[in-house]
Amino acid sequence: MATIEEIEIGRYAKELEEDVRHLLKKYSRIMGWDVPDLDEQAARKLILDALQASVVRVGSET
């Protein structure tokens, strides 16, 4: 049986994914301003790696 918290977070899963996509677009755009010949695939990977590292750091605070 799922807890009320698990049910509630399930409602937000799609919204969380959209937020991550928004962050990826935001930081890709910012990197594009600073790097003239930006390798978009490499930039996306670096940004996603940084986001994952941030999630781990924030997770360890709780």
Image: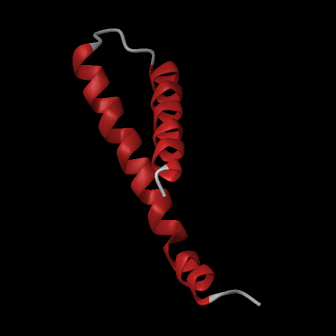
The image quarter in which residue 34 lies: top left
Q: In the displayed image of the protein, which residue is found farthest to the left? A: 33
Residue under the point 45% across and 67% down: 15
Q: In the displayed image of the protein, which residue is found farthest to the front? A: 61
The x, y position of residue 2, in whole percent, is 71, 86
Task: Choose between 3 and 28: the one closer to the eye.
Answer: 3
Task: Choose between 62 and 46: the one closer to the eye.
Answer: 62
Q: In the displayed image of the protein, which residue is found farthest to the right? A: 1
Q: What is the image's colouring?
A: secondary structure
Query: Where is 15 relative to 54, above or below?
Result: below
The x, y position of residue 53, in whole percent, is 51, 36
Image position of 28 (left or right of 54):
left
Image position of 61 (left or right of 30):
right
Query: Where is 3 relative to 47, above or below?
Result: below
Residue under the point 47% across and 32% down: 50
The image quarter in which residue 35 lies: top left
Residue under the point 29% across and 21% down: 32
Query: Where is 62 relative to 44, above or below?
Result: below
Task: Choose between 28 and 5: the one closer to the eye.
Answer: 5
Quadrant in which the N terminus is drawn: bottom right
Query: Where is 1 relative to 18, above or below?
Result: below
Residue under the point 54% across and 44% down: 56
The x, y position of residue 62, in whole percent, is 49, 58
The x, y position of residue 54, in whole percent, is 45, 40
How many marks the image carries: the answer is 0
